[in-house]
Amino acid sequence: MSDVCLILEGTYPYVTGGVSACVYQLIKNTPQVTYDLIFIGATKNNNLGLKYPIPENVKYFREIYLYEYFIPEGPIDLNFEIDHTLIADFHQALTTHNMQKFEELFLKIFQNEHFPSPEDLLRSRQVWQYLEQAYRRLFPGQSGPSFIDYFYTWRFSHFPIFKLLTTEIPHARVYHSFCTGYAGLLASIAKIKTGRPYVLSEHGIYSNEREIEISLSEWIYRDQAVDIHPEVSQYFKTWWTRLFLFLGKLSYHHADVITTLFRGNQNRQVEHGASLDKIQIIPNGIELEKFSPGAPSTKTHSRPVIGMVGRIVSIKDVKTFIKCLLVVKQKIADFEAYLVGPYTEEPDYYEECKKLVTLLELDSHVIFTGKADVRDYYPKFDVLVLTSISEGQPLVLLEAMAMKIPLVATDVGACRELIVGRDFEDQMIGHAGITLPMGDAARTGEAVLKILSDKELARQYGENGRARVLKYYTEDQNIRSYMSLYNHYMAI
Amino acid sequence: MAGIGFRLQSYFSSHDLLRNLRGAVYSVFISSGPWLITIFSLAYINSFSATYLGDPDKYLYKAIVSYAYAFSLIVFGAIEMPVTRYLADKLFLKDLHDIRPLYYGLCFCLMIFSLLSCLLFFSFLPVPFFLKVASFFFVTLTMLIWPAMIFLSAAKNFQVIVIGFIIGALTMAFAGKFGLLYGGVGGLIGGMACGQLLIFLILSVCIFYEYESFDFTSFEILTYFRRFKKLSLGGLCYYLGVWVDKFIFWFSSSGQQILGPLYTNTEYDTAMFLAYLTILPALTIFVVQIETNFYVKYLYYFKLLDEKSPLSMLDSAHQDMMIALKHGLNAMIKVQSLLSLTIWFFAADIMLFLKLPTIMISIFRFGVLGTYFQALFMIFNIILLYFNAQKPVLINYAIFFITNAGLSMMSVYAGKKYYALGYALSSFITLCISYYKLNYHLQHTHEYVFMGQSLHQKHVYS
């Protein structure tokens, strides 16, 4: 039996990103802990090889692909009696957030040794009869949502869940998932089955992210013709949204402790059904050896340098950054601006940004580096700007703070907490830069000018930033926080 | 045969009597035209062969022709439905670039298969070499014409089939007569093979023009045989079932050995042949009713489904489809019952009129009932196939084959009075089971439409 079973959905070791980096860092820096890994993905062919190494203390690695199946032709008769009233009760309980019913359903039906495979269940006559009756009960009149979509939405929304509910889970002292959703579901049933504690760490708010995805998605059928009846036209979008909300609530219900990166997320989790007393904040931590400022006089030139680090994508609102440079240019004729980050994700947006640079006659100032090692650029920067319209707890800010670079950032996600401080003790350290509302190029430009023109202020911001990172945001602290959770729950 | 429905509908929708009549004739032609034409030309050949050939040669000729049709139809049974499915799918996708090579390839394989079978079979048959060659060509061409018909039917080119058969049948009759006068049985079979060759060539040329080709050979058809092995097996069972009672009567104590492995049973064959003629109206009415009324409703149901309709609309479309089906079957059953019963009642007079031995009367009577049941169960199973119910169809046809074999064997031992009773009973049993299955299937149409097909990962939205 391993110490910790990590349940990972669409992240380490196959996908890069903040969570993946955090998971890798955690495993690598806790060699004394043995891990089981369960990776949950959509289909196997989406994986393009390992993006991170798998350290030696990982004892078991399993991949589950939710959308890999072959459902043979039906209908067949199951020799398993499905308790329809229990399912009806369960759906009733869903709307009232009664999580107890799920446990009952799971233990009574899915834990039954005669329970069929998910494939057989999906093609069974019993399920068809249940679906047809349910549809007729819900839409007794002439109008109703597309029946073919009703049928396939049911299949595609329930199959992954049935698959997980019938999955064997390795025994471990602690189950730890890095999001709610499917990973959270698997961790929850692991807890129901084994009684071992469940630690949930959420960086972004899963149900929120899915909700945005679903509302923007093209593939979920929406009947334009009957938009006046949103309960029919939006039926399938509502279905999916409710499903992910439910999975979120289920995880919050079963988790013994919920960790998140910063305060703002904590409030969103409470909104989505988490109880406040379970939530702990474990912020990101950065490796200090990698991000240490050199001697103060490493800069050989006198041209001020403005930096922006991040992918060139619309969510980072790169255009506001470019526009703010025009404000800077009116006061400072000679400066450089670096945009460090890959631009292949949204090629159209990148083209628009380049056009904007030309239009504003900033070509001689602006440099797009493309994908690059940020550590080559931090020492050059006099100020770092982040204009994102949405963020979690951006590592860029933490890295820049460790490098003593003063910050200008929009007030989104954890940016204010990082720059101003999250509580009284933290705030005593002082500001690490300036926060401002999103999309305001003029104020961004003024803030940059303020830092560039006041050397003492800039130095102070830089010192404060580094002090804050040292106090709260080091990798050691991050690992220690997780370790103390592990130690606590492993011992139960 | 789907696409002819709309044209038939236009014939029948007007109140013009002449137009309706033309519709009826057209239906007869496309439903049973090739079959009728072949029967008439064979009847003509029979009549003159009787005057020119001695008894042994006459039986030899008849046995070769019977064996050729039995063998070619059974082989065809195994390939018919998968190939039809393949053509229908390709036509639906308008992806026709490998149809021509498929046709050539299929013909080539059938020829090789026929050659090997004939080599084996003829090694047991002590007849002149020329007759063997002529028989080989006759069997092979007969076997090639069946698939040619499905390739043209898929393209809705029914006129060509009928015209090809008329020209070919006329040639068969006259070339046969000419051959008979100069070369005896071998000449007769050779002449008939010429007629078959003409049909095959006409159909092949039309297939060549019907399907454009980019000379692209794919072996995708093989996946269809894997995917639809139930259909392939079902077709095989059906044609085995159709012939197994004849085989039993040929090889039983009541049959006569003609030469080597060639056997016949004149009384049984002739009576059954006449009995099969009586179901012509059923088949014609089926084509008209199903292809016009039912098929339109059937398409509408699937169109609604595709257009994301609510269940209530699918329900009413399903109901319309059932009403059309009921009307069609009622009309057919009314006419055919009346006809079959009348013929059954006057069987003795008909036999007398045709100057056939009285021993045939009871065989003919059971044959009339049996073919009536067979026509019905075949139609029920075709409807089942509209709903992709492959497994029930396979089971039904397998039941037909097994019960027909068993009961026919018993009726041989029961004595002359009970000949063909086995076949009639077998058809009746199959009819009852097919009816039960069809009824169940139609009551659960939605369920079978949605759950009846396997689902792979690639269907996932992503």
Image (cartoon, coloured by chain):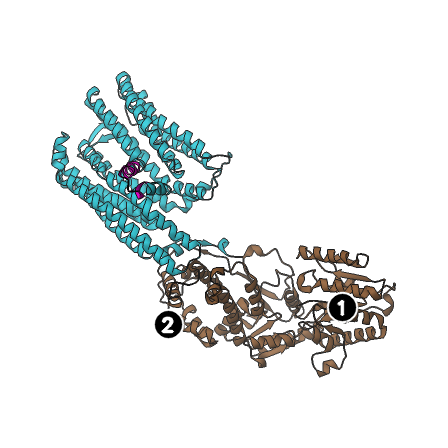
Chain colours: A brown, B cyan
The image shows residue B348 at horizontal and vertical percentages of: 12, 36
Snapshot quadrant of residue B362 = top left
x, y percentage for residue B334? 21, 46
Dividing the picture into quadrants, the one containing residue B427 is top left
Query: Taking B287 as reference, is A408 above or below it?
Result: below
Question: Which of B425/B46 is in front?
Answer: B46
Disc 1 residue type (three-letter): Ala
- Which residue is situated farthest in the top direction here? B182
- The residue stretch that appears in magenta: B11-28
In the rendered image, the residue lying farthest to the front is: B16
Foreground: B411 or B459? B459
Q: Can residue B418 be seen here?
A: no
Locate residue A139, reporting x and y percent.
40, 66
Label count reads 2
Residue drawn at point x = 34 percent, y = 55 percent: B318
Q: Is residue A187 left or right of residue B310?
A: right
In space, the residues marked 1 and 2 are separated at their CA atoms by 62 Å
The residue that mark 2 highlights is A85
For the point 22% across and 45% down, the residue is B373
Task: Give neighbour class at mark 2: few <14, some 14-19, many 20+ (Cα, 10 Å).
Answer: few
Which quadrant of the rendered structure holds the N terminus of chain B? Answer: top left
Q: Where is A49 relative to A394, above or below?
A: above
- Look at the magenta stretch and give its main secondary structure: helix
Q: Which mark is residue A442?
A: 1
